[in-house]
Amino acid sequence: MMNIYVILLRGINVGGHKKVPMAELRELLSKQGFVDVKTYIQSGNIILKSSEKDHEKVEQIVQQAILDHFGFEVPVMARTRNEIEQIFDACPFSEAKKENSYFTILSRIPKKELVDEVMQITYDNEEFQIIKDCLYFYSSVGYGKSKFNMNMFEKKLNVRATSRNYRTMVKLLAMSLENEK
């Protein structure tokens, strides 16, 4: 039985750093035994099928393949299609806010005491909530003007993270549904 995974890479093809051509990445991952490898935009969104049951093992395979082939390390988050759908559906914001929010996928569920500490942080015009392994973020002034700093949250929560906006999440869910066929 093949599992459909959504793979999220962090920090590639940004400002000319860590260049990863998508066609080359698809070919590389196909050579690793993954099936029906598709990518969406240049920021490291991948849909693929794998017989592997453990998402951490999938992350390791993808990360090692990129390191061996491109010569640099990239944080990799892998979730099954169902896990991505649950993360999307669990968004605590109203529909209007949800459409302008960001989904920050965390490498694991952070410790409760770290979450409690982080939840004391407040910024004007910004809201965030942490549910399981996702930090949901909304800013009424827009992400680019927000004070939100993912690196700070990673350090305080002791996790790795990568963010995607609402439109990207919708597209990844649609693409992963196509992969079921």
Image (tube, rainbow, N blue to C red):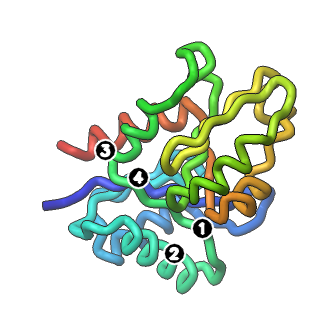
Task: First in sequence, mark 1 or 3: give its number.
Answer: 1
The percent position of residue 51, horizontal first and vertical second, equals 21, 67
Q: Would residue 116 appear left or right of 38 to someone viewing this image?
A: right
Residue at 35% x, 58% y is 37
Q: Earlier in the sequence, mark 2 or mark 4?
A: 4
Mark 1 vs 2, N-terminal side: 2
Q: Amino acid at mark 4?
A: Val
Which label belongs to residue 6? 4
> How would you rate the neighbour count of disc 1 (Cα within 10 Å): few for under 14, some for 14-19, many for 20 or more?
some
The answer to whether marks 2 and 4 mark residues whose Cβ atoms lie closer than 8 Å is no
Q: Nearer the viewer, residue 119 or 17?
A: 119
* Residue 63 coordinates in the image, percent (x, y): 51, 75
Check if mark 1's residue and mark 2's residue have beta carbons within 8 Å. yes
Please identify the quadrant where the N terminus is shown.
bottom left
Q: Is residue 75 left or right of residue 13?
A: left
Check disc 2 and give the amino acid type: Gln
Question: Is label 2 in a helix, a strand or a loop?
Answer: helix
**Residue 114: image x %, image y %?**
66, 56
Residue under label 3: 82
| Occupied quadrant, residue 122 | top right
**Gap between marks 2 and 4 measured at Cα:** 14 Å
On the rendered structure, is 177 left or right of 79? left
Secondary structure found at label 4: strand
Q: Which residue is mark 2?
A: 63
Residue at left offset 38%, top offset 70%: 58
Q: CA distance from mark 4 to mark 3?
A: 10 Å
**Residue type pointed to by label 3:** Asn
Q: Label for residue 75?
A: 1
Residue 13 is at least partly visible in this image? no
Instruction: Please tell me whether residue 1 is drawn above or below residue 171 in the rendered image.
Output: below
State yes or no: discs 1 and 3 in contact (Cβ < 8 Å).
no
